[in-house]
Amino acid sequence: MLRRDRSPSGEITRTNCRRCGKEVHGIDGRYSCPLCGWVNHWSEGHTTLPTGRDDNH
Ligand SMILES: [Zn+2]
């Protein structure tokens, strides 16, 4: 049985540049502005980062 790899996520998203305000498009929540070079942090993308994980002592 062949099983295809999980298709790469390529959801086009857009936001406004936080530096110059231009509308920038990105993929999966990652952006880079062509005008001023602003890029958002990768952690703001639609990644599977653990959020609010339990931190048991
Ligand atoms: Zn910009």
Image (cartoon, rainbow, N blue to C red):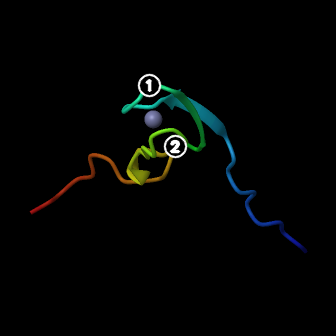
Q: Which residue is mark 2?
A: 31
In the rendered view of the protein, which quadrant contains the C terminus?
bottom left
First in sequence: mark 2 vs mark 1? 1
Residue 44: name its quadrant.
top left
Q: From this viewpoint, which residue is outermost toward the bottom?
A: 1
Q: Residue at x 26, y 46 (%)?
A: 52
Foreground residue among 55 and 23? 23
Q: Position of residue 4 (x, y in %)?
A: 83, 66
Q: Could you tell me the amino acid type at mark 2?
A: Tyr
- Label 2 vs label 1: CA separation? 13 Å
- Mark 1, other Cα within 10 Å: few <14 / some 14–19 / many ≥20: few
Q: Is mark 1 within 8 Å of ligand 1?
A: yes
Q: Which residue is mark 1?
A: 21
Query: Is residue 4 shown above or below 32?
Result: below
- Mark 2, other Cα within 10 Å: few <14 / some 14–19 / many ≥20: many
Task: Classify residue 16 as left or right of residue 41.
Answer: right
Task: Classify residue 35 as left or right of residue 8.
Answer: left
**Residue depth check, mark 2 versus mark 1: number of the one nearer the observer:** 1
